[in-house]
Amino acid sequence: MDAFQHQLLTLIGGLICFCVLVKCIRFMKYIFPHTWSAVPQTFFRSMGEWAGKGNFFLAKRGLNVVMISRTLEKLQRVASEVEQTTGQKVKVIEADFTKNSVYKNIEENLQGLDIGVLVNNVGMLHNPLPCRFLNGSDIDESLVNCNIISVTKVCDARACMLHLRKGLILNLSSGLGTFPCPLYTMYSASKAFISTFSKALQAEYKAKGIIIQVVTPYGVSTPMTRYQKPGFITKTAEEFVSESLEYVTFGDEVFGCLAHEMLVIEFDSA
């Protein structure tokens, strides 16, 4: 009996040590990303000439970018700044992703462009403030169109990537989608969809040379979060994007930055 207990305790201890080791390795990847899996300077440019729904940081990495948003004046101002700062070409497309009628215009404007990187980062809340599901605004198609349908509409770009057998698709989820989140029910559920959809899609197309990664941040200071004060956990959008692009080769899902990865490890340990 004593021998059995000793073997059982040894086995349990070994499993605990193994789990701790796995978490440490996962954590070390974020501390030393350049050592663990350095992203070459030419990585993004090797995917293609253009980044669909791109940004300043992708332009800095040598890509021409397509900026898509519903505010044309803001788009034009930002596009001018990116062109002057990086020397890359910028194409702007006005589109309101709460409406399903925008995709034909987007498709027409993307014709002939070598889209190698695609970023799906649009999103909206069901209600500006936390509230019970039935106490929020009337449910319409706007949130579903913006948070879910917009992500699935990568098919045309993916078809091009399949032909070239290369490409990078980054889908932005949220930490609130990793668990049922009362008072943000619709938002949480829509982000959970993005996570599941992205991982399943990667399983289907990984062998075709396409990287599909879901990025799952926790606190980021944006208009949607009413510009929460940045700190160790809450990152500015610029900080988060810059750091998260270092992790595009880290697997099907990343949390985008060291601080958010630490949160996940803490939650898993609780």
Image: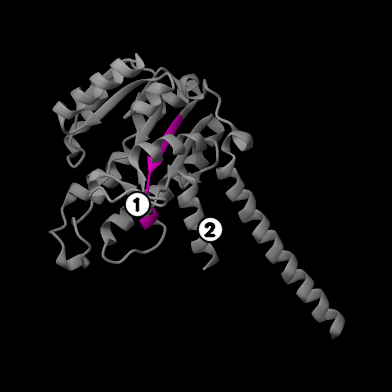
Residue 228 visible somewhere in the drawing: yes
Q: Position of residue 167 (x, y in %)?
A: 46, 27
- Residue 15, compared with residue 237, is above or below; it is below
Instruction: Give the residue at x 19% y 59%.
Output: 129
- Residue 202, compared with residue 95, is above or below; it is below
Q: Quadrant of residue 134?
A: bottom left
Type of amino acid at the residue the image marks with label 1: Lys
227 or 169: nearer the eye? 227
Give the labeled residue for mark 1. Answer: 191
- Give me the C-alpha separation between circle 1 and circle 2: 20 Å
Type of amino acid at the residue the image marks with label 2: Ile
Give the labeled residue for mark 2. Answer: 265
Q: Is residue 201 magenta?
A: no
Q: Could you say whether the residue bearing mark 2 is in a helix, strand or loop? A: helix
Q: Position of residue 136 (x, y in %)?
A: 16, 62
Q: Is residue 175 magenta?
A: yes
Instruction: Give the residue at x 19% y 23%.
Output: 76
Q: Which residues are magenta?
A: 168-176
- Residue 155, compared with residue 188, is above or below; it is above
Instruction: Give the residue at x 71% y 65%.
Output: 15
Callout 2 crowding tier (Cα within 10 Å): few <14, some 14–19, many ≥20: some
